[in-house]
Image (cartoon, grey):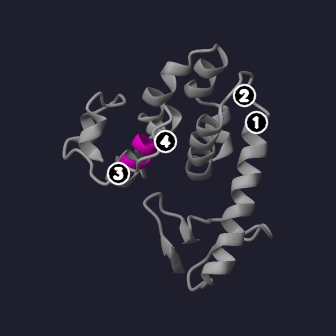
């Protein structure tokens, strides 16, 4: 939670729990502040909005963990990125096992691999598989790891 706006790794003004556009449609800007309660309202609105939007494009059955992983991805990368992704194409053919690897391809911000995004994609890949532990570490060579790591337990 960030009560004051800041520029995220992707170069966008961000506030609260990752809000870049408020539910009223206005973009977050420099100097904005928010309470934790307001940030929670914004986050919950955005989660519901992302879930409703990505469900329009998913043609296969998902369990709760799988949907939550994809909503987290869309919350971070956007619905348009999800809609046009190889991840969605593979998922809609029934290739559920491809999703964790496809998630790991989305670790760049402003053209550079980011350790925070690597950990987030790892967490989403774990959640996809029903593992709810959150990674606390990342591999120092994370930028060269292009697939979901088989040694994922090392990062918990």
Q: Determine the image quadrant of residue 89.
A: top right
Percent from the top left, x then y, of residue 98?
A: 49, 21
Residue found at x 72% / y 28%: 58
Q: Earlier in the sequence, mark 4 or mark 3?
A: 3
- Residue 124 badge: 4
Q: Nearer the viewer, mark 4 or mark 3?
A: 4
Labels 1, 3: front one: 1
Q: Nearer the viewer, mark 3 or mark 2?
A: 2
Q: Residue at x 27, y 45 (%)?
A: 155
Mark nearer the N terminus (4 vs 2): 2
Q: Which residue is painted at 56% across and 81% down in the image?
A: 30
Residue 154, picture quadrant: top left
Q: Position of residue 70 (x, y in %)?
A: 60, 39
Is residue 108 placed above or below 14 in the rendered structure? above
Q: Nearer the viewer, residue 117 or 95?
A: 95
Q: CA distance from mark 1 to mark 3?
A: 28 Å
- Report, in whole angstroms, how far the alpha carbon at label 4 lies from the one at label 3: 15 Å
Label 2: state its secondary structure: loop
Q: Earlier in the sequence, mark 3 or mark 2?
A: 2
**Residue 114 marker:** 3
> Most prominent secondary structure in the magenta stretch?
helix
Q: On the picture, is 113 further left or further right than 13? A: left
* Percent position of residue 137, x then y: 27, 52
Q: Residues within 10 Å of mark 4 (few under 14, many from 20)?
A: many
Q: Which residue is mark 2?
A: 58
Badge 1 element:
helix
For disc 1, the marked residue is 55
Tag of residue 34? none
Q: Is the C-beta separation of discs 1 and 2 under 8 Å? A: yes
């Amino acid at each position: 939670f960030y009560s004051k706006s800041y520029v995220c790794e992707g170069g966008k003004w961000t506030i609260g729990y990752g809000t870049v556009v408020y539910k009223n449609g206005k973009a977050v800007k420099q100097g904005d502040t928010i309470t934790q309660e307001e940030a929670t309202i914004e986050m919950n609105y955005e989660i519901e909005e992302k879930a409703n939007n990505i469900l329009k494009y998913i043609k296969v059955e998902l369990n709760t963990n799988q949907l939550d992983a994809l909503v987290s991805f869309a919350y971070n990368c956007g619905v348009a990125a999800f809609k046009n992704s190889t991840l969605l194409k593979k998922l809609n053919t029934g290739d559920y096992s491809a999703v964790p690897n496809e998630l790991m391809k989305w670790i760049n911000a402003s053209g550079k691999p980011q350790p925070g995004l690597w950990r987030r994609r790892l967490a989403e890949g774990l959640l996809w598989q029903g593992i709810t532990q959150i990674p606390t570490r990342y591999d120092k060579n994370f930028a060269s790891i292009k697939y979901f790591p088989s040694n994922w337990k090392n990062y918990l």
